[in-house]
Image (cartoon, rainbow, N blue to C red):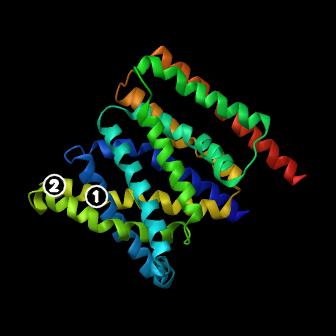
Amino acid sequence: MGSHRSGISAAIAAFFLWGVLPLFWKQLSFLSPGSIVAQRTLWSLVFLLAIAVCRREFSAIRRGFESWKSAVWHLLSGTLLASNWLLYVWATLNGRILEGALGYYLNPFFNMLFGVLWFGERHNPLQLCAIGLALAGVAIQIPAAGGLPWVALTLALTFSLYAVVKKRAPLESRHGLTVETLLLSPIALLWLMTASQGPSEAFGGSWPHGWLVIATGLATTLPLVCFGHAARSIPLTTLGILQFIGPSIQFFIGWRFYGEPMTAARLSSFALIWLAIGIYAADSVLRARSRAD
C-alpha cells in the first residue's frame, strides 16, 4: 500500500510539473528555442550522469553502446524526443500553449492508434469511440485555424513515435534517456557554439539567467524520475488516467495566464477531447475492475 501511495504521489508530481513547465519556459525567452533545447539536453545529461554515479549504473548505460543497432535505436528515440522538446518550447514562447495542450491530450489516442498499426493491439467499441471523438475534435479546429493544427498533431505524433521506438530500444527508460542525451550532446554543444557569441550569451548574460539555464536540467529530469517511479509502482491504467493532469494545467495556463484566445471552435474541439478522455478513463476503470474480479 505504501508503494502504491508513493506511486500515485509521484505520478501526480510528474504530471503537475509537466503542466506548469510553460511558466518556466516563458522565463527563458531571452534564449531561442533551439538554444533552450540544447541547454536542456546538456544539463539533463549532467543530472542524469549524477544519478548514474550515485546508483553505480554505468554498466547498464554502457549496454546502450554495445552494438550499432542499439546506438541507432537510442539516437532515433533521442531525435524524436528533442524534436518534441523543440516544438513544445517554440509553441510556448510563441503564444500557442493551448495548441500544445491539445497535442498532449491527443497523445494517448495516437498511442492507441499506433498500437493497432504496429503491435497488433485490438480495441473495444468504447476505445474506438474515444479515438473517433478525439479525431473529430481535431477536425473542428481545421476551419478556424485555416488548416491543420500542425503544432498539436506534430507534438502528439513525435511523442507517440518516441514511445514506439522506446519499446524497441534495449534499455529501460532512465538509462535509455541517459544514452539519448549522451548521443545528442555533441549536437547541442555545436549548436551553442555556433548560435552564441560566447559563454555569457549562452547563459543569458547574467547570474539569474544563468541559474535559470542550469535549472533546465532539473526541470527535465525531476518529472521523468517521478514518472519512472510511478510507472513501476501503480497500474498503467491509473497512470494513463492521471496523465491528463498535465495538458489540463497547460490549457488553464495558456487561457487564463497568457490570454490565448478561446474561440467557440476551439472550445468545441476541447469539449470533444474531454468527452473522449472521459470515455477512455471509464473504459480503463471498467477493464481494471473486470480483471480484478
Displayed quadrant of residue 205? bottom left
Residue farthest right in this picture: 293
The answer for how far apart the CA atoms under marks 1 and 2 are is 10 Å
Asked if residue 114 is positioned above or below residue 230 in the image, the reply reads above
Left or right: residue 202 versus residue 215 is left
Front residue (pair 76, 251) = 76
Asked if residue 78 is positioned above or below residue 239 in the image, the reply reads below
Front residue (pair 16, 197) = 197
Q: In the rendering, which numbered label is found on residue 38?
A: 1
Q: Secondary structure at mark 1?
A: helix
Give the residue at x 35% y 42%. 23
Residue 21 screen position, x and y as percent:
40, 46
Displayed quadrant of residue 9? bottom right
Q: Amino acid at mark 1?
A: Ala
Q: In the rendering, which numbered label is found on residue 195?
A: 2
Q: In the rendering, which numbered label is found on residue 141?
A: none
Left or right: residue 142 versus residue 289 is left
Give the residue at x 49% y 59%. 224
Label 1 vs 2, first from the N-terminus: 1
Quarter of the image with the N terminus in it: bottom right
Asked if disc 1 and disc 2 are in contact, CB closer than 8 Å, the reply is yes
Front residue (pair 293, 196) = 196
Give the residue at x 57% y 50%. 12
Residue farthest top in this picture: 264
Residue 267 screen position, x and y as percent:
51, 20
Q: Amino acid at mark 2?
A: Ala
Left or right: residue 59 versus residue 187 is right
